Amino acid sequence: MVIYAPVEISAIHQVMNGNDSINVALLPSGFVILPEGPPESRSVIDNRQVEGSILTIAFQILVNDLPSAKLTLESVETVNNLISCTAQRIKAALHKVEDV
């Protein structure tokens, strides 16, 4: 499980200089990778146990400061691309670990 909250550098500097942190948005995001199903349900191929995984990704994103604002197609596409790219990067990183 990996949880993080990106914060703008300017906001960090303001807080470090004594300004109030109430205006700094902490929007947590993260992912978790869990095994797929109980061990007895996993497959065996060529005398090797094959295990699947479930990847769950979560983002809390402030698209617009106005509560009554409607989502635009552009913002939906941006979020969709963010989630897709994140999933691809996690999968690529796991394949690199698997090759080691």
Image (cartoon, helix red, strand yellow):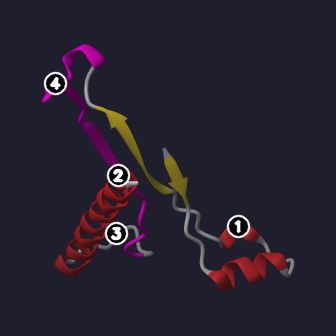
The image position of residue 94, as x and y in percent, is 35, 54
Which three-letter amino acid code belongs to the residue tagged 3? Ser
In the displayed structure, does residue 1 sit left or right of residue 55?
A: right
- First in sequence: mark 4 or mark 2? 4
Residue shown at 48%/44% (left/top)? 1
Q: Which residues are magenta?
A: 39-64
Q: CA distance from mark 4 to mark 1?
A: 53 Å
Which three-letter amino acid code belongs to the residue tagged 2? Ile
The image position of residue 57, as x and y in percent, is 35, 52
As displayed, is residue 31 above or below residue 14?
Answer: above
Neighbourhood count class around disc 4 (C-alpha, 10 Å): few under 14, some 14–19, many 20 upward: few
Neighbourhood count class around disc 3 (C-alpha, 10 Å): few under 14, some 14–19, many 20 upward: few
- First in sequence: mark 1 or mark 3? 1
Q: Nearer the viewer, mark 4 or mark 3?
A: 4
Q: CA distance from mark 4 to mark 3?
A: 53 Å
Q: Nearer the viewer, mark 2 or mark 1?
A: 2
Residue 98 or residue 17, whichever sits in front: 98
Q: Is residue 44 magenta?
A: yes
Q: Which residue is mark 1?
A: 22
Q: Is residue 65 at least partly visible in the picture? A: yes
Q: Are marks 3 and 2 in contact (CB under 8 Å)?
A: no
Local SS, label 4: strand
Q: Nearer the viewer, mark 1 or mark 3?
A: 1
Say the numbered circle drawn on residue 68: 3
Q: Are marks 4 and 1 in contact (CB under 8 Å)?
A: no
Local SS, label 3: loop
Residue shown at 27%/63% (left/top)? 88
Local SS, label 2: strand
Q: Nearer the viewer, mark 4 or mark 2?
A: 4
Residue 78 or residue 72, whichever sits in front: 78
Q: Which residue is mark 2?
A: 57
- First in sequence: mark 2 or mark 1? 1
